[in-house]
Image (spheres, coloured by chain):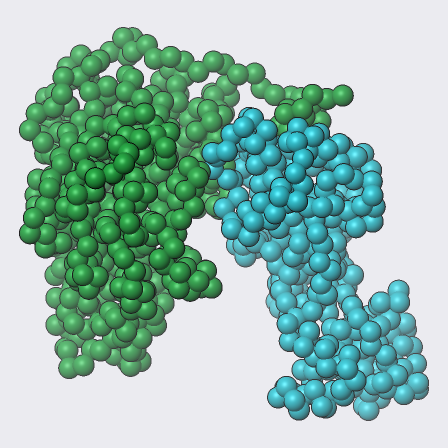
Amino acid sequence: MYDFSIEDYLYKFFGYRSFRTGQKEIIESVLAGNNTLAVLPTGSGKSICYQLPAMIMEGSILVISPLLSLMTDQIKEIKSFGLKDVIAINSMTPKHEKSFSMRNLQKYKLIFTSPEMLQNTFFINKLKNIHLSLFVVDEAHCISQWGYEFRPDYLRLTNVHKELESPPVLALTATATPEVQHDIIQSLQLKVCNKYIYPMDKPNLSFVVKKVPEIADKKSDIVDTLREFRVPTMIYFSSRKEAENISAYLQQELPQLRTAFYHGGLDSTDRLLIQQQFMANQLDVICCTSAFGMGINKIDVRLVIHYHAPAQLESFIQEVGRAGRDGKESVSLLYFHDTDQHISRRLIDSELPDILLIKRALNYVLENNVTKLSELEEYFLMISDNNEIQWRFLQYQLEVRDVLKVNDETINVGTVDTDNLTSSINESALQRLVYKQKKMYQMIDWINEDECRRAALYKHFQAGFQQPENMCCDYCDFMWQNWQPKMIDSNKIQTDAWHVKLASKLMIKEA
Amino acid sequence: MFQYIILYCLNNLNGERSVANIYYLLKGKKSTQTIQDSYLYNLTEFFGVYRSIARSNFNRVIDELAELNYISISGKAFATVNHEGQQNLAQLDSEFQNTYFKGMTYEKHAPQFLATFILLIQTVTNLHIKKSRFIPVIDNGSIQTNVKNFLQNKPLDMSVLLRDIYDDLRQIFSTASFPDFSIDIFVDYLTSANEIGLSQQQIALKYNISKEDVHFHLFNIIHYILEQMKLAPAKYKVLPYMSNQRQDLSLTDSAMVTYNYYGKGYSIKEIAGTRDLKESTVQDHIVEIAYVGEVKWSDHMSDEEYSMIKKALVQTNTKQLKTLKELLPDFITYFQIKLVIALWHKND
């Protein structure tokens, strides 16, 4: 069918000689024009599965991705490979750029966009006018009510896909229980679909859970561990403040280690610098929130520490998946204190609006005769302390109840009784809360489980797991003294005069 | 340095303006009021030097200064510098007397120049080691185009280019005396193929200063470089080609339009009529223009009126309009007073 083998294309465009597990089968299915569902573990090169087809297939490929940061990281990476025909069209794109790229859509091989952009009728019409060879749904678990990151706006994809005359679909995700897989295919109404499900367990990873009697034990134990094992390390936190604090603490206690923090609150240049320092081994330890790591392709992270337990197993699996992408022995270490449950609980609660907030928002609509969506959005973000997750929830609830018309972004309460509406939306919020809590208890149960951690972790997602290559877990056989990773060479602290540093950075010899 | 700059500004404002005015000054707010004030109180050097500053960070420093008892804040948020503050200011003066800010001239250009310079170093060092795949640390399309254009117009060997940049920087740094660490901070911030630069947050930690201080250290150097490129371009090999300066007048957009009409000889009344503006708005534009462009007082008042206003200015040594207005006869307008202040200021 093609003059070159797809391996030739892989080498030509990406410089790799061979495919990683799953990539080839998935790409072949896509190139043959089939609907495809692919569950590939984190760090196994999911994006190649549509980037390569984009280089081979006629027309353009539309990629729907839920997170802005994920999109920009990807585009940067693609451009660094020398492919320039990519564009991201989302709410962050400046207006004039947006209108230019929308007018020239056919120019681009890869068009990244966000689900909320797909409400834009102008954009949809432009998409109708170009030849779309593939419809990619990235992080496809977001479409499932049972997915841990359910995003109501993903449900719109079904209609948009139809409107665009149903081009072949590629749905990609790293974590999906069989239940979620089923839900993805159902929601997208794919009658025929090739499924490629790859096991998500990583045989090079060992699991350790440490329950601590005092919260302060966490940081002292981290210091002890890092003093002994000087390896590229990520430490995950559930709060920005805590990530900053522990980063400062480590800098003070372990000055020989190069530590920094990273979270969504840094400005974009600082974020880029920290990421690249970590990639270039100028940093040993990074204290971060879940904002870090997506799109980061560092292969030799040896230790992933969780200072707090994530709110569900899926996030945990994603985050530990950033360790040992090179296949070498790596360790996941999770700390747990009894009060951590409350932190997870608060996190979950903060994602859903309570009944008073819902009521206030609806009353505002009624009393001020609000008809524009943007007006309500502004008001809601103000009263909810800029809580966008809650806003997305409310927006979707209004939409499914026909109070909100998405295409022209208008609200029409009409004859609806706001009390009924409030309690019905609240009902949905509570259901979601119960579901999230169930997920949280699954995570906590895993921590408290009295059996092999590997078995207990993966049983929710797949039947069985691969034989671990090294130590398995703290229940089975893990002992720190048996872990012998390659340590980072100790580096001397630079105290050179500025002109010496300058010459070194500019790569010249001083005269 | 941030604390010093705020104290300096407050001192110049002499309790006649609220602290928020300094915030707008640093942000470079394009309003007639902010632009005029920066001339009135001799603060043009700091106009727009920190366009990205967050209100909360600004307020934090104000609170710190109040806590140190360096400043007192009145009910209307007008601040005066206390005795302790004066002493501190004198002390800091010796440390920071060599600042080279020229905000009114470079406020727009400086951030672009810094970003272009950072990306250029990253690009050239990468090309030097034959690495064409790297992730740019500056994520801005127009800056990336700048660098591309520069490299196309200067088809030099990369090692020659790097040597020239090095020589230029040494030459520049030898002609100025920057505050302690300034140059170290600048070098730490650079990203090259063999070493990613420190983030501003990390630099703040390393030198035990605030993140805002880091910004001022960096931009002090950038303003100086830009000024040198203008004054003595022949002394440098590469940098002048990077800075392609477009001299633009610091006027609000609306004042710019008025300026065009005014230059063609239209009267205030005519301009107000065609533009559907109030006459007082156009008058404000004229005052704005007077600071940077050509305005003759004789078009707007008699010799007698002019000398009366001037006399009042000298006698009271204040720039508070209300005080001056009360002192002068009723037929003298606010517009006339403002215009004389502006012109007097320029000839200073």
Residue A50 versus residue B281 in the image, above or below: above
A472 lies left or right of B202? left
Residue B174 versus residue A414 in the image, above or below: above
Whether residue A360 can be seen here: no
- Give the residue at x 20% y 20%: A203
Colour in which the image shows chain B: cyan
- Give the residue at x 44% y 16%: A488
Q: Position of residue B24 (x, y in %)?
A: 62, 62
Chain assigned green? A
Quarter of the view holding residue A123 = bottom left
Label count reads 0
Whether residue A165 can be seen here: yes
Of the 4 image quadrants, the one containing the C terminus of chain A is top right
A61 lies left or right of B205? left
- Give the residue at x 24% y 52%: A133
Q: Position of residue B207 (x, y in %)?
A: 62, 33
Viewer-side residue, B73 vs A399: A399
Viewer-side residue, A135 vs A255: A135
Quarter of the view holding residue B150 = top right
Quarter of the view holding residue A245 = top left
Q: Position of residue A184 (x, y in %)?
A: 13, 48
Residue A99 versus residue B223 in the image, above or below: below
- Give the residue at x 82% y 40%: B235
Q: Position of residue B227 (x, y in %)?
A: 77, 49
